[in-house]
Amino acid sequence: MRHRILVSLLFILCLTQIPFVFAAKDPNDSQGSKDPALFSRMTGFHIYRTEIKEFDRYEFAVGPDKKEKVEGHHSFIIYYANPGITLPGGLQVARNYVNAAKAIGGRQLYEYDDGGRIFSIIQVVKDDKEVWVEVEAAGNDQYSIHVLEKQLMKQDVVANAEAMSGSIKDTGRVAVYGIHFDTGKADLKPESEPALAEIVKMLKADAGLKIYVVGHTDNVGQFASNVKLSQDRSASVVNALVSKHGIAATRLTPFGCGPATPVASNKTDEGKSKNRRVELVAQ
């Protein structure tokens, strides 16, 4: 009797750990392909094709006639059914992914039927990552998923006058990561000069452009101290542009935000480095 109870408890435990019916890799999978980190795939299906882009943008439907653009690491995977299996319905496929996401704290944002094709939009926030998923299934021999891990683009180019100008025209602002200070100090380090030169080039190319030079910090230390530090750093940038490069002081306004407007989580060193930045904002 005790043995049967123990077996039953172990069985229930296993079910709670695997709350959806998915399968592992299949010998028919395309070469080098694999399932995304958060999900496996429906039983009896193999990966027909995978497209991966390190940084991409995809629009997810989040309501009737409403879409949200998300940027980050993008995986697009098409699954095909193996011969002889009983094909699941499109809703069954979508529900499997929704249930799997909910089991790890995710949620379904939206679902709609487009001529018999079920689209389910899912969001999972886990381990400081925000993952968006679109499942498309119609109850035939294939279904597909888009998985986008939201993130900031890796900043390969520190500063470029043309790119900065384009960003300001498009969004009204640009983050410059090539301006450097010692920890807790506001004096510009010599390696900041290439970035400053590109800012000067941008300002000289557009004589009518006036900007706020906005300093930002991570959340290490006291809030008030960080606000003052960011203000002092932005003032150092303005002083260098005026005194060393001849930019009119009337075109530049320093301002410090401290840690108040992060662009990444301060829980990781990478996130902190992204938050320590100088932004140029059009007036």
Image (cartoon, rainbow, N blue to C red):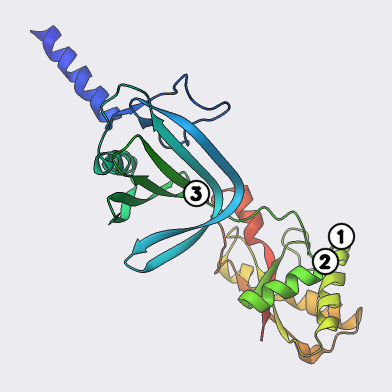
Q: Position of residue 32 (x, y in %)?
A: 58, 27
Q: Which mark is residue 191?
A: 1
User: How crowded is the residue under tag 2: few (<14 C-alpha within 10 Å), some, or many (20+)?
Assistant: some
Q: Earlier in the sequence, mark 1 or mark 3?
A: 3
Res. 230 in view: no
Front tag of 1 and 3: 3
Quadrant for the N terminus in the image: top left
Per the model, the C-alpha gap separating discs 2 and 3 is 31 Å
Q: Are marks 2 and 1 in contact (CB under 8 Å)?
A: no
Give residue 225's position: percent from left, percent from top: 63, 69
Residue 266 shown left or right of residue 104 in the figure: right
**Mark 1: few, some, or many residues within 10 Å (few <14, many ≥20)?**
few
Q: Nearer the viewer, mark 2 or mark 1?
A: 2
104, 131: nearer the viewer: 131
Disc 1 marks a residue whose amino acid type is Glu
Front-most of residues 265 and 162: 162
Q: Helix or strand or loop: what does disc 3 sit on?
A: strand
Residue 283 vertical placement versus 233 (above, below) = below
**Label 1: which secondary element:** helix
Alpha-carbon neighbours of circle 3 within 10 Å: few (<14), some, or many (≥20)?
many
Alpha carbon distance from label 1 to label 3: 35 Å
Residue 241 vs 152, above or below: the answer is: below
Say which residue appears at 53% left-offset and 37% top-offset.
Answer: 50
User: Label 3 amino acid?
Assistant: Leu
Name which residue lies at 90% across and 82% down: 243
Q: Nearer the viewer, residue 77 or 116?
A: 116
> Residue at (30%, 49%) from the top-left corner?
118
Spatial separation of the CA atoms under disc 2 and disc 1: 8 Å
Residue pointed to by mark 3: 148
Judging by the rendered image, the residue that carries numbered circle 2 is: 195
